[in-house]
Amino acid sequence: MKKLVLIAAAAVLALNLNGQNIVKGSIEGAPHHQSYMPTYSSDGSSRTPKNIILMIGDGTGLAQIASGYFANGEELTYTNLKHLGWVTTKSADAFTTDSAASGTAYACGQKTYNHAVGVNLEKKPIPNIPEIVIANGVISGVVSTDDLNGATPASFFAHQPNRGMTNEIWGDLPGAAIRYFAAGSKEVFEKRPIATQKDVQRAFTVVHSLDDPAIATAQNVGVLPPAVETGYIVDGRTDFLPKATRQAIDFLRTRTEGDKGFFLMVEGARIDKACHSNKFESAVRELLDFDQAIAEAIKFADEDGNTLVVISADHETSGLAVWGGDPSKGNVEGVHVSGGHTALPVPLFAYGPHAQDFIGVQGNEQVAQKIIKLLMEK
């Protein structure tokens, strides 16, 4: 009898981890896309890369990737890559990070406290990758399906003590060391103070569509589409992320000088947001969309031969596990054990020159340090 009571207690505990019931979800007949198979011609070479693309799947742990892999008939561009590592994500003040602290570590190469955007423990600004590498003639861009003031994209241009300081984060944009951004949204931008809007429009040609012809001749561009175009796939977003990724690459490539190159950060933000809500199908669809953005980056790396692509995550969200499924039908079942972040290490994939530098276990701040070193060597 005592044994039965203990088993029952364990079951109750399991079903209420972190005060929340375990949530099961599924996707059936997931839309299939063909993965891109790299040539591997530049992969792992010892030459210094001219360009580096850092891709952050917000909230993406191994189970999120595996769910997408099985839903897509056991293929992803992600999983065609050969150089793999793990990234630990704890912040300076917490075992489990938030996106701002981890974003800052990836952007600045230093650990900081949860909620900090581009500042250290003393709340002093830390130089980010775009600010550091511009001294070597390297230009930068940021792409995200989050609002531009979201914690991860903001970490690559702003310096504020709290991620919730939305107006202040937008106020940092006109002086930022980036030449291109594409993120949400027109509506968010138009809620900012008029003075901030005017300052941003003086620093960037602000457009509301990736198809705006003004992009072709502009020196600095900000793409702020209507909110639905950076919202969830299940709510109507189409190909914004892969299309913006390729546009950012082409924009930066054509504006580099000589062999100076570019740095680009691309975030698939809504994998995390879907996992926070325990919406498994939405999370898988976001992962599949992010994989298509990855394909754009890897295709360019093959075309160019001098581009390193690094793909990881700021943290894992929801303690996701793969429960079952039928990959031949695009069917997958998953289980969320939390509505928050976890401290699980996240996978890292790298492709191109010096991809071998990123294998093994490393901190998120070390990823940034390696990127900075490579871009400053040129």
Image: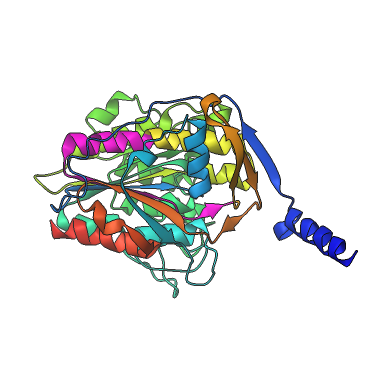
* The one of 356 and 4 positioned closer to us in this rendering: 4
Residue 35 percent coordinates (x, y): 37, 30
Residue 311 percent coordinates (x, y): 36, 48
- Indicate whether 153 appears above or below 206: below
The structure residue drawn at horizontal position 27% and vertical position 61%, both measured from the top left corner, is 370
**Residue 6 covered by magenta stretch:** no
* The one of 17 and 58 positioned closer to us in this rendering: 17
Q: In which quarter of the image is residue 157?
A: bottom left
User: What colour scheme was applied to this rendering of the protein?
Assistant: rainbow
The structure residue drawn at horizontal position 41% and vertical position 66%, both measured from the top left corner, is 119
In the image: residue 331, left or right of residue 205: right
* The one of 204 and 304 positioned closer to us in this rendering: 304
- Quarter of the picture holding the C terminus: bottom left
The structure residue drawn at horizontal position 87% and vertical position 62%, both measured from the top left corner, is 5
Q: In which quarter of the image is residue 369?
A: bottom left
Q: Give the range drawn in magenta.
A: 293-317
Residue 60 showing in the rendered view: no
Q: In which quarter of the image is residue 362?
A: bottom left
Residue 12 percent coordinates (x, y): 80, 57
Residue 193 showing in the rendered view: yes
- Quarter of the picture holding the N terminus: bottom right
The residue sitting at the left extreme is: 258
Residue 2 percent coordinates (x, y): 88, 67
